[in-house]
Image (cartoon, rainbow, N blue to C red):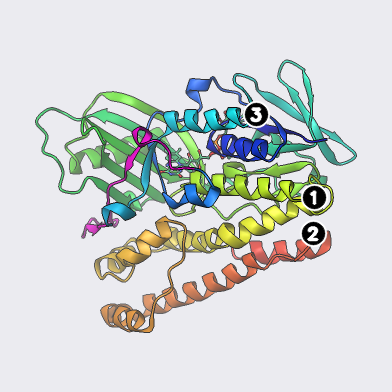
Amino acid sequence: MKNIVVIGANQSGLSFAKFAADAGFAVKVFEAKARDQVAYDWTDDMMEETFAQVGLPLPPEEIHTRKRSWTFIPPSKCVRVFVPVPEEELDFAMYRRPFNAWLEGMAVEAGAQVNYETRVDRMLIEDGRAVGVVLADGTKVDAGLVVDCGGVNSPIRISLPDDFGIEQQIDPYDTFVVRRTFFNRPEGTKRPQYTNCAYLKHLGEGGISWCLLSYDEQRADVLIGRLGKMTDARYKNALADLRRDNPIIGQTVMTGGELLRIPVRHPIATMVSNGYALVGDSAYMTIPMLGSGMAAGMRAGRFLADVIADPVGDPFSVENLYRYQKKYMKEIGAEHSAINMMKNWLLKAENEDIDFLLSKGIVNKKMLVEASAGRMLRMTFPELVSTGLRGIQRIDLLLELALLMNRMEKQLAVAQNMPEQYDKEALKVWREKYEKAFKN
Ligand SMILES: Cc1cc2nc3c(=O)[nH]c(=O)nc-3n(C[C@H](O)[C@H](O)[C@H](O)COP(=O)(O)OP(=O)(O)OC[C@H]3O[C@@H](n4cnc5c(N)ncnc54)[C@H](O)[C@@H]3O)c2cc1C
């Protein structure tokens, strides 16, 4: 059977639907929300190269602009590290609603069927294999493959039987709880020198905040995100602090403000089972440092479509689908898992240590750009020497960092070296090694 059911019609689900329909599969997408409510009402950043990587044309000019360069601020605010990136290297800032409409148009043109306001209630399983889904109104839809793009709290992943071997729940402390709100910019407020300020461990708390001048320059785009949970009191306190620093934050909420959750951890250790595959946030494919997940979700969709279009044996068997996970880990997930170690280290670090690292340029501009893009940076020998000289007063901290880098390299190697073929026992051994770095 060549039917595929996709759960979720945000950009991971829509991209995969297009790629799979292009490859000749009959694809049905089911999305719980209304069409105009799926994507956020704002821009989000994505690397331009993603489109070429997945074989899509560049989106029309009117649905994206260029992101502006970041300024990073450590907990004590003792320094503002502006990271200027040349215009042509800046990420695209995608207007997410028209972006989704563009992806949906291509998916439908390729033959996929996209159904909104149609919640998938559960998965149909026979003899340990996914064989379709049951919709909220009780309709059964058969499928050879169910692709779960249902997001970080995918109800399908959470209710999988144990014999699928897939971790169902995410630890809340592996997620950022964020509120992103656009406030009016009070009339007469000066245009800030730094338009995109990111506060690392803002107020010494585990997480980040940002204040950006919106592209129309009429609003302040404010994000407050904390690991695990965020109380109202904590949110208000952080907002008050941002207001003190950023007069562009007015009192009127223009849009946003919903409490959302983003996975910020290493990719899930098992992404596939017979007739089932996870793609996007449901498999924690975001960059752990910032929570960006659009590019990885789209690239994963491409990998999966390629693997089923050119299968070894049964396209929807776990043995064939495993090739998708292996490619994902090798090309993207392994680096994300190493970056997650850096994120965990930064969260545990003393505030003064982060102040020191940023103010001395030890965590330098290049590193910040690479980590934000989900890549690891390796220093050249002269860079190492100059870093050592700048950080000489805190040799203990430098040593700690060097050890961290070493552990990250090892993690990268483990994550990239999954067993060649699907083998349940070999995978169990790999999984233990892969997860070890994240056990307390
Ligand atoms: C404030 C904020 C800022 C961000 N900034 C960036 C950024 O700058 N760059 C970037 O790349 N990423 C960013 N992200 C992350 C990005 O939004 C996610 O990585 C991306 O949306 C994940 O897409 P997805 O399609 O995998 O999952 P989701 O976006 O979570 O979509 C899942 C979809 O599945 C649907 N669904 C769930 N259950 C069911 C069901 N039972 N039946 C039917 N449908 C179901 C949901 O309604 C939802 O539409 C940001 C996220 C937030 C919250």
Q: Residue 397 location in percent, x, y?
A: 37, 75
Which comes before the other along the chain, label 2 or label 3?
Answer: 3
Residue 422, numbered circle: 2
Kind of residue indicated by mark 1: Val
Callout 2 crowding tier (Cα within 10 Å): few <14, some 14–19, many ≥20: some
**Mark 1 → mark 3, Cα distance in angstroms:** 26 Å
Q: Secondary structure at mark 2?
A: loop
Q: Which residues are magenta?
A: 57-84
User: Which is in the foreground here, disc 2 or disc 3?
Assistant: 3
For this orientation, the residue located farthest to the top is: 137
Tag 1 and tag 2, C-beta contact below 8 Å = yes
Q: Mark number for residue 318?
A: 1
Q: Position of residue 255 (x, y in %)?
A: 34, 25
Q: Earlier in the sequence, mark 1 or mark 2?
A: 1
Q: Assess whether residue 58 is covered by the magenta stretch.
A: yes
Q: Element type at marker 1?
A: helix
Q: Which residue is mark 3?
A: 111
| Mark 1: few/some/many CA within 10 Å (<14, 14-19, 20+) | many
